[in-house]
Image (cartoon, rainbow, N blue to C red):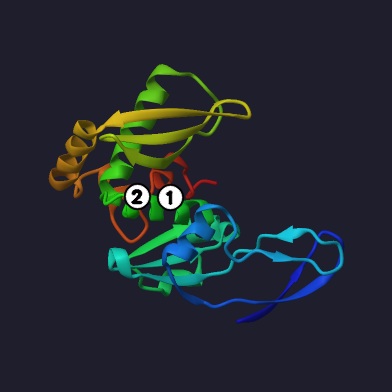
Amino acid sequence: MKVKIPCHCGSILDFEYDDEAEINPESAEEIIHGRFMNTICDKCGITLKPEFPVMFTYPAAQMKIFLIPELQRDAFLRGQSPLLSRNPDRFVIGFQELAEKIKILDAGLDDIAVECVKYYILSKIENDIKTENEIIINFEKYENDKLTFCIYGLKKDEAGMLSVDMNFYNMSKEKVKTSIGEEPFKSFLTPPYISIIKIYRDYNKS
């Protein structure tokens, strides 16, 4: 696809990207480290990080993942985006969610169960800590039988790390099996878009 994108310096760049791509070790590395789809302005030299809709084929996970640009998040979650007509195994919104999805699947974990773990973490934070900040929880890694999450919003301009053991993940996985058809789990664990954001933010009223 050929498009024109604006730079902060006022220049308009010709930009070309593929609206279908494969997630392989090289592209996964670029996505996780924020380099995928980057381009450099030939006038001022700044690195631009555009986001456009892309259907990713992920052979290692036998999955198709469709990337929704971050700027279209609200329209998508209000059911007002034409991109809803696409039919992937999973939707993700923005490169951060795509990177997280890759980390989860590469670790051999069930992304639905991981999102259930995030729900329990968020519920505990809301019960124990009074904060007006939005809490964002991202899966970071799995090693030594522990899942590590990065949590934003507990303190201004700071991120915290939290690890949970595999027993908690397995408990969440069993909960998914028995309760995915019940609320609140049905609202945020039903594919193709799996995210606690769907119940954490009220897009019907915003």
Q: Position of residue 53 (x, y in %)?
A: 53, 70
Q: For mark 1, does the 10 Å Cα neighbourhood hold few (<14), some (14 to 19), or many (20 or more) residues?
A: some
In percent of the image, x 35 and y 37: which residue is there?
Answer: 118
Q: Residue at x 42, y 63 (%)?
A: 25
Callout 1 amino acid: Glu
Secondary structure beneath disc 1? helix
User: Is 52 placed left or right of 122 in the picture?
Assistant: right
Q: Position of residue 89 (x, y in %)?
A: 32, 66
| Amino acid at dot 2 | Ile
Query: Which residue is under mark 2?
Result: 104
User: Which of these two is toward me, 171 or 35?
Assistant: 35
Disc 2 on helix, strand or loop?
Answer: helix
Tell me the quadrant of the picture where the N terminus can be found.
bottom right
Q: Which residue is mark 1?
A: 100
**Quick one: which residue is furthest to the bottom in this view?**
2
Q: Residues within 10 Å of mark 2 (few under 14, many from 20)?
A: many
Most foreground residue, 174 or 82: 174
Q: Are marks 2 and 1 in contact (CB under 8 Å)?
A: yes
Report the residue at 29% width, 63% height from top.
Answer: 61
121 is higher (above) or lower (below) than 173: above
Badge number at residue 73? none
